[in-house]
Amino acid sequence: MTRERLPVLVTAIGGGGHGEQILKALRLANDGRYRIIGADANPRNPQFALVDDAVTLPLASDPGYLDALFGLIDRFGIKAVFHGCEPELKLFSRHRDRFADADIFLPINPSGVIDLCMEKAATNRVLGELGFRCPRYAPFSTRDALDTIDFFPVVVKPSLGGGGSANVYVAQSPLELRGLADYLGLETHVSTFLVQEYVGTADDEFTVGVLHDMDGKYLNAIAVHRSLSGQMNIRMAVPNRTGRAALGNRLVISSGISHGQVGRYPEVTAQCAAIARAIGSRGPINVQCRLVDGHVMVFEINPRFSGTTSLRAMMGYNEPDVLIRRHIFGETIAVDFAYRDGYVSRSLTETVVPG
């Protein structure tokens, strides 16, 4: 007897974000078990060619977004919804009861975990309180606060929001830091930024996924040892003029596009799993870090599926599929289930979109 395909909605599948990654992972897992409905605000989204049913949705900021979304849920009989961008994650988190009332599987972290990870200064503070090592940091919203920074070089980033390395810069001196503050519109725009100590080298960087089920049971962890060697993978790189040779010849900020060697890396994943457990993660979480003298130094935590979700799935670590199998199909998932090691590389592709 053939099992009816499970209708699954993935939103924001365009633009190279984590929605596209979830879509690719589900396609890799799809042996006929899923009917994938893909949604995006862009009607010319090339990823529409990869789904069973393509639909447009307004942006998450649109007042009619939720009604349009639940109209799709009713239309297709959708049983699971995966968000593809952070504005949707925050919106879904605020309205999670509506999904629960409709008996929709919504694999997102508790609101407290999402709020913590979205506020980078709070993330650093809590990690320190829990006994984990993290770079020195200081939030600032006025120029006067910059005079207290004495741990150069530093990374300057928005204090609120998630990954992708948007508006992230390196300052190697007080003069550069003040220049960045002017460039970013400090005191002319209502913004809070974070100054974070630059640690390790580009060769030390990892993006780490830790997966718990929605009941909080640990399932597995995986790491990508990032290869920071090209325009796709590097947001910025500047010569190291600090005299601190241990940081390498260049100070590098990675982009939101990761590739590299995928594996278990127990010296990294064990520490990240402890962090995920300590902050109460349920579902997927992604830790951005560098390994410095044997210690994971976290510079960001994304409380969601990663921009490397499909890379992991290619190695047999398919987080969206695992969560559906665990919570909808009722399968038993072995803790630390096996997956392959391997190097995964990314490149650009071009698509002619009809119309």
Image (spheres, rainbow, N blue to C red):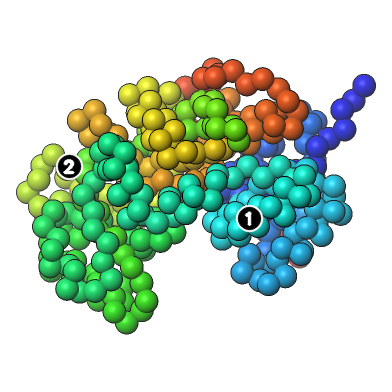
The image quadrant of residue 223 is top left
What's the distance in space between the residues labelled 2 and 1, CA to CA?
42 Å
In the image, taking residue 185 as reference, residue 309 lies left or right, namely right
Q: Residue at x 48, y 47 (%)?
A: 113
Q: Amino acid at mark 2?
A: Gly
The secondary structure type at the circle numbered 1 is helix
Q: Residue at x 55, y 28 (%)?
A: 217
Local crowd size for mark 2, using a 10 Å CA cut-off: few (<14), some (14–19), many (≥20):
some
Decide which of tag 2 and tag 1 comes sooner along the chain.
1
Can you name the residue that lies furthest to the left here?
A: 243
Q: Residue 336 location, x and y as percent?
A: 51, 20
Can you name the residue that lies furthest to the bottom here?
A: 188
Mark sitting on residue 338: none
- Please determine whether, in this image, residue 272 is positioned above or below residue 1: below
Residue that numbered label 1 is attached to: 92
Q: Amino acid at mark 1?
A: Phe
Q: Residue 95 location, x and y as percent?
A: 65, 57
The image quadrant of residue 183 is bottom left
Mark closer to the observer (2, 1): 1
Q: Which residue occupies the foreground of this view, 266 or 29?
A: 266
Q: Residue 114 location, x and y as percent?
A: 49, 50
Residue that numbered label 2 is attached to: 248
